[in-house]
Amino acid sequence: MKRPAPAWPLPRVFAHRCGGALAPENTLAGLRIAAAMGFRAVEFDVMLSADGSPWLIHDETLERTTSGSGRVCDTADAVLRRLDAGTYQHRAFAGEMLPTFTAAAASCRELGLMANVEIKPAAGFAALTGEVVARHIVDLWPGESFPLVSSFSEVALEAARRVAPQLPLACLWDCPPADWQQRLAALGGFSLHCAANQLDDDILAAAHADGILVLCYTVNQRQAAESLFKRGVAAVFSDRIDLLMGI
Ligand code: G3P
Ligand code: MG
């Protein structure tokens, strides 16, 4: 199976959920802060609303990070558009709105940020979310370097691959299963993303033998990141981008 790769050089650090811990997660403020601090790449999560539109949000429910309540997949765009997604972190971010995927893509392009788009389907919506996100990516990054597309859901990744086989894909596993290589190969995946504390050297050796890059989350200490790079990890996702500047 063909294995599409990003057309941009992979940086060492991806700001996790847009701006890591320095901004409310999955917001345009996070993108601006990551760029202002000199980072070239960000990761964010994309989920569908009740109208089937893609929005940046991590949880299936609105309560933790927004002024709304209920399930994202049960909430209409008109309601999501009015939500505050900044105050939960700090009142200095009051008025920061929940961003659409379209707005986030435009902001990435303006700020010169490369993206790892994590497809985050609500339960029961894996294939649809994969399709919608992939179609949006093809429209939102016209003739440009596509983002790296990852998911914990292989159903979502397979759906994305079906509608846009040119996109670089990555499988996310907290702890990679024994047959991770076959599963990644079946999707034509470019990279393996896993929890830093679940990574063992056998996984790294097998990945390297196969030409697969390994990326780890969530790495919030400089020494831990340096040690992972020494072991052969290609890049890390971090909430503490302030501690990983210039690494
Ligand atoms: O993509 C890496 C990381 O974002 C996966 O975990 O739960 O923060 O989306 P989560
Ligand atoms: Mg994520």
Image: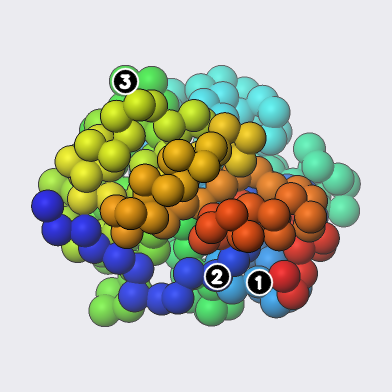
Q: CA distance from mark 2 to mark 3?
A: 34 Å
Which part of the image, by quadrant, shows the C terminus? bottom right
Q: Is residue 88 above or below residue 34?
A: above
Query: Reading the chain from its start, which is encountered first: label 1 or label 2?
Result: 2
Q: Cβ–Cβ below 8 Å for labels 1 and 2?
A: yes
Q: Give the residue displayed 81% in from the left and 42% down from the top.
A: 89
Q: Give the image location of residue 2, x and y in percent.
A: 14, 58
Say which element carries label 2: loop
Report if the beta carbon of the residue with label 3 is closer than 8 angstroms to ligand 1: no
Query: Reading the chain from its start, which is encountered first: label 2 or label 3?
Result: 2
Q: Give the image location of residue 48, x and y in percent.
A: 39, 37
**Res. 181 image quadrant:** top left
Q: Give the residue displayed 21% in from the left and 58% down from the top.
A: 3
Q: Amino acid at mark 2?
A: Pro
Q: Give the image location of residue 167, x and y in percent.
A: 26, 60
Say which element carries label 3: loop
Q: Is residue 51 above or below residue 225?
A: above
Query: Reading the chain from its start, which is encountered first: label 3 or label 1?
Result: 1
**Res. 199 image quadrant:** top right
Q: Give the image location of residue 230, x and y in percent.
A: 63, 60
| Label drawn at residue 18 | none
Q: Nearer the viewer, residue 217 or 180?
A: 180
The residue wearing badge 3 is 124
The residue wearing badge 2 is 11
Q: Is residue 103 above or below residue 142?
A: above
**10 Å crowding of disc 3: few (<14), some (14-19), many (20+):** few
Q: CA distance from mark 1 to mark 2?
A: 9 Å
The residue wearing badge 1 is 39
